[in-house]
Amino acid sequence: MTLLIEGGMVITNNPAQPLLVEGAVAVEGDKIVAVGRAEEVKRNYTAEEIVDARGKLVIPGMVNAHTHLFQVLARGRFAEATAAVASAPTADKDMWLWNILKKSMFPTSAVLTVKDLVAGTHLACVEMVRSGITCVVDNHYGPTDKATVVKLAEALEKFGMRSVIARGIAPKEKPPLADKVRIPGHVFKYSSEEELRITEECILEVNRQSSLIQVWPAPLSEMYISPEFYAKTHELAKKYDVGIHTHMVEGTADPKLYVEEYGRRPVELLYELGVLFPKFQMAHGTWLSDVEIELIGKTGATVVHNPFSNALGYSPGVAPIPKLLEKGGNVALGTDGVFENMFEALKMAIGLQRVTHLDPFALPADKVFELATLGGARALGLEKQLGSLEPGKKADLVVVDVKKPYLTPLSREVTACGLLYHLILFGTGTEVDTAVINGKIVLEEGVIKPVDEARVREEAQEAADDLAQRFTEADVL
Ligand SMILES: [Zn+2]
């Protein structure tokens, strides 16, 4: 079965031929078998299925390296919580992040059912694919029992979304810092042993059955996971050759409180414990010190930058992305829940660095696109399979309709770099027209294929209404 994406301008992310003006991509099964001039590729391959990309742009699919898919159900609650915290007379700016979480995401996660989770996951997948995302790291910390994690994997598999379910872990044996930032008790449901056992069972059940979905351990944050438990998680990750996902140095108050507790900063301590390695993904890294940045570069660990969250979500500050890149750290891009639009994240990543450094070249558009593709692939240890359009790589790609009024006119002297600037500065995500994941078309000329989109929207609204009801009853605020 050969699928041919033909006639478009192809941005490959392959330095050997970054742009094909009239190009084509041939796909057999789940893999790309040819990328070249349309004429040549068409001569060599007979297509059973054709995507007509004439006048459109073909780009590698993007990796959303940090999000919490269920949180799309809590959009309304998040907005209300933000308004409430902002107007509270005792508003403590340093605790802003934790206070919003306590009024929105933590209570939502406490009352979430499998039915809600499936509805939210499919809604989030629709939103992601529509903004060019073909792979996601879902840091799931709602109910994390094995049956729920397996149902989540089934929902992602049904949609055909390439995914890592980073199973959120927060053992009952919590460090004193957890109480200092007042994390609600219900977050700590299982003992350390149980957390490791359930994660291992999920890995055995899901990773061996699916070529698309993996489960990884995700100790939730350095603020409520002990350093010793990170080391135990590292043993589990090594045993199954998976990575570790976590939140790290996000809030303004976090590093100060951490140093008071442990005498040094978290990345320094984790480095001493030997748990940093290339598939160690830390979301945020907003307040990393120079020493921590050096250690990230040295170990090849990844920082997942979440510009929407940095700016409009919880506003903890702006991660030092140029410095991380300069020191050899890997950087990927995430949306961090509530919203899942990667085009907005790309745009915001550029804007934040420009105004922070008063430098229009602080984070170029082609570089930020590289973070969202090859950076994400490296974060997953899948750089040989994802992130660019080259023969032998997995067929994850996106077709963008550049004939939208806000993308018109295009320069006649196109380059890959120029086209990426055009797309990111003026695009919105709504111009994504077709998406292919693992060789399968999941979005075709604007129509979502794996699920009924209208039904998914209805189910998500019903789930959110229902959640709001239980949210009050649960009285977990
Ligand atoms: Zn997060």
Image (spheres, rainbow, N blue to C red):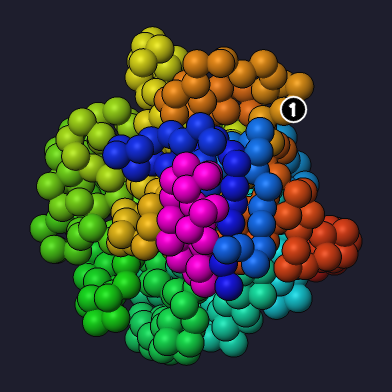
Q: Give x and y (percent) for residue 296.
A: 20, 46
273 left or right, relative to 37: left
State whether residue 113 is above or below residue 370.
below
397 left or right, relative to 73: left
Disc 1 beta carbon < 8 A from ligand 1? no
Residue, x 47% and y 48% (percent of image)?
Answer: 40
Residue, x 34% and y 42% (percent of image)?
Answer: 14
Quadrant of the rendered image containing residue 200 = bottom left
Could you tell me which secondary element the residue under label 1 belongs to?
A: loop
Q: Dot 1 corresponds to which residue?
A: 404
245 left or right, relative to 28: left
In the depicted view, which residue is nearer to us: 346 or 303? 346
Q: Give x and y (percent) for residue 154.
A: 62, 79
In the depicted view, which residue is nearer to us: 349 or 45? 45
Residue, x 38% and y 52% (percent of image)?
Answer: 390
In the depicted view, which residue is nearer to us: 203 or 415? 415
Quadrant of the rendered image containing residue 465 = bottom right
Q: Which residues are magenta?
A: 26-45
